[in-house]
């Protein structure tokens, strides 16, 4: 970029173009929601059959196109705004330099050179001649200590100052200074153009109607490129509080941003925004869906690039008189190099596709819109998934369900199904009221029952994260409605142990004893212990703590908890001495508390749902908590 181009440049044209892309991104976002939620809901509510299923499938593909358009146009808008910010700064510097030249009666040439008139002390009846100087973008302000061996730019600046001091025309030094400012402004504009032009050219979709895994992988790469170049642009926006801050601080920061600034953060920092407690559910959902799509694209692209397994896997080798089946050398070599990674990727991909399937099934089986409040394929060793049925920011009743041992991203389907069943039965019990049930999996769950689930360390490590999420859910609901929801915290198996440690956890911004968990009721099922002798020891009101146990293998878990160290003095929540309400249960095993038979809920499920919606009169008790 040269002086004349920068002088004639109108940065507002770039911001106007950015606004155009923002509008397209916003329209695509609305169309994405309509195609995925509203239209499919209406189709499924009134019609059925193969034609409807085919139409819904096409709508889901269309929704993916809209989602892709939303993200890519958001990147284009943010890139243009970042470019416009850099060019505006450079243009302002140029305009200021030109204004100073005009005030000094200098003239600026088409190439950015500065001409100055005769001035100074007359000699032989003549003023020192005027002249023309060209600037350098390498000059530095005066007043710095010069080290010629280290900084050639400083040396150049010092020589310029020396030349100005000895020059007979006092205008010379001023002209050089203005010319340097012009050159620096042009250099900054050129650098911004060089930086952003290829990035903007790269933001171009394939000429087809299918959003493939490689397309989303490219989006992830595009986002990384734009992130790297937009640091200065984001520096103009108030930065977010440090990770792990009080959710109320996060909420205040978000409220203080303009719509454009919020979109920039969702576009450039989707993972950070998606994990930020206290922010609105729709903002976190938008950010996390982008992370999900990009991660799925990256993982699918990688797994598709792994060489196919050699065949056959086995061959038979004679060992003495016997024939033994052994792995072939080719397969063993392939497995050593690719086996573990492929298995890992396929596990994560399965979990991601489970989440996407839940989005696609909105309005099926009576389910509401889903909100992805947290996602990271690699967090906590086994991944992070926080998936809500319905919007917790506006729900009258909210339940947060914490799963237990062996939960992973790849197995999240089983845990989300429990949350689905809870939503259906709770909503049926509270007509006219809105319900949100949240599957919260954001800790490193034990992988084995005997060697890992008998230890408390997993619960201790997860407690701060659960505490912050609960505080964030409370903050977001108050921000949206001005009040709190009726909130139930639920734990299955080891998840109940995590709840116990969370109740005892003290953070920098919340003393759990002076400021108990922001929940109204606590429900535990199949609990091996909550690290306390009594419900009251956890800061809970015993009349609002509910426990149930099942038959079969649940006897091993709850009974085994007495020896596992997860219940103080061997006490578990269903023991009378713990002081909780003991609900009746018809669960035949440790994982059956959420069973539905031909659409009819089990007694265990009905009891849990009654607590979620505050219908305590409908809870079938085996033993009530003491007054």
Image (tube, helix red, strand yellow):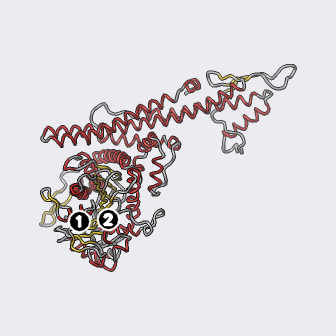
Is residue 467 something one can see in this rendering? yes
Q: Which of the image's four quarters has the N terminus?
A: top right
x 45%, y 64%: residue: 510
- SS for callout 2: strand
Q: Position of residue 299 (x, y in %)?
A: 31, 48
Q: Which residue is mark 2?
A: 521
> In x, y percent, where is residue 563?
29, 78
Q: Is residue 217 above or below residue 316?
A: above
Residue contact between numbered discs 1 and 2, judged by CB atoms under 8 Å = no
Question: Cα distance, mark 1 to mark 2?
Answer: 14 Å
Which residue lies at the image location 39% right of the left edge and 57% below the top edge?
474
Q: From the viewer's side, name the closer residue of 590 and 317.
A: 590
Q: Secondary structure at mark 1?
A: helix
Quadrant of the image for the C terminus?
bottom left
Residue at mark 1: 617
> How would you rate the neighbour count of disc 1 (Cα within 10 Å): few for under 14, some for 14-19, many for 20 or more?
few
């Amino acid at each position: 970029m040269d002086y004349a181009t920068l002088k004639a440049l109108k940065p507002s044209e770039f911001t106007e173009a950015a606004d155009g892309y923002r509008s397209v991104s916003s329209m695509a976002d609305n169309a994405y929601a309509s195609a995925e939620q509203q239209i499919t809901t209406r189709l499924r509510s009134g019609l059925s059959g193969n034609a409807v299923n085919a139409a819904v499938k096409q709508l889901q593909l269309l929704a993916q196109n809209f989602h892709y358009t939303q993200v890519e146009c958001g990147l284009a808008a943010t890139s243009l705004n970042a470019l416009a910010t850099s060019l505006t700064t450079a243009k302002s510097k140029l305009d200021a330099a030109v204004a100073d030249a005009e005030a000094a009666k200098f003239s600026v040439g088409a190439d950015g050179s500065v001409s100055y008139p005769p001035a100074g002390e007359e000699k032989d009846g003549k003023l020192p001649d005027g002249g023309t100087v060209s600037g350098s973008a390498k000059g530095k302000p005066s007043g710095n200590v010069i080290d010629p061996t280290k900084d050639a730019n400083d040396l150049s600046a010092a020589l310029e100052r020396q030349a100005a001091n000895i020059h007979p025309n006092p205008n010379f030094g001023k002209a050089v200074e203005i010319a340097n400012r012009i050159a620096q402004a042009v250099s900054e504009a050129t650098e911004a153009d060089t930086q952003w032009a290829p990035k903007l050219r790269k933001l171009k979709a394939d000429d087809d109607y299918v959003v493939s895994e490689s397309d989303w992988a490219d989006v992830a790469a595009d986002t990384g490129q734009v992130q790297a170049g937009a640091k200065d642009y984001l520096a103009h926006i108030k930065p977010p509080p440090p990770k792990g801050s009080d959710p109320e601080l996060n909420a205040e920061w978000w409220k203080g941003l303009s719509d454009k600034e919020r979109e920039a953060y969702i576009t450039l920092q989707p993972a950070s925004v998606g994990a930020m407690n206290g922010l609105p559910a729709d903002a976190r959902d938008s950010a996390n869906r982008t992370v999900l799509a990009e991660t799925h694209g990256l993982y699918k692209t990688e797994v598709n690039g792994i060489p196919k397994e050699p065949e056959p896997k086995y061959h038979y080798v004679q060992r003495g008189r016997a024939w033994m089946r052994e792995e072939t050398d080719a397969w063993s070599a392939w497995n050593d190099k690719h086996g573990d990674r492929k298995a890992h990727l396929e596990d994560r991909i399965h979990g991601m596709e489970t989440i996407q399937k839940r989005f696609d099934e909105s309005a099926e089986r009576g389910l509401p819109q889903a909100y992805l409040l947290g996602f990271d394929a690699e967090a906590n060793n086994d991944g992070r998934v926080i998936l809500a049925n319905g919007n917790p920011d506006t729900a009258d009743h909210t339940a947060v369900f914490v799963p237990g041992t062996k939960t992973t991203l790849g197995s999240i389907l089983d845990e989300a199904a429990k949350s689905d069943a809870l939503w259906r039965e709770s909503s049926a019990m509270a007509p006219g009221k809105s319900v949100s049930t949240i599957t919260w999996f954001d800790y490193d769950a034990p992988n084995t029952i005997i060697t890992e689930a008998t230890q408390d360390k997993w619960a201790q490590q997860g407690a701060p994260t659960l505490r912050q999420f609960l505080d964030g859910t409370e903050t977001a609901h108050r921000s949206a409605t001005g009040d709190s929801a009726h909130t139930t915290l639920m734990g299955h198996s080891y998840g109940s142990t995590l709840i116990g440690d969370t109740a005892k956890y003290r953070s920098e911004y919340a003393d759990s004893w002076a400021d108990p968990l922001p929940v109204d009721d606590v429900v535990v099922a199949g609990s091996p212990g909550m690290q306390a002798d009594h419900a009251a020891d956890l800061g809970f009101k015993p009349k609002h703590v509910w426990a149930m146990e099942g038959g079969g293998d649940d006897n091993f878990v709850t009974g085994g908890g007495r020896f596992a160290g997860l219940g103080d003095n061997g006490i578990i929540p269903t023991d009378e001495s713990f002081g909780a309400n003991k609900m009746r249960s018809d669960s035949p095993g440790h994982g059956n508390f959420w069973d539905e038979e031909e659409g009819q809920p089990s007694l265990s499920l009905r009891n849990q749902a009654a607590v979620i919606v505050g219908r305590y009169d409908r809870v079938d008790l085996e033993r009530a908590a003491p007054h």
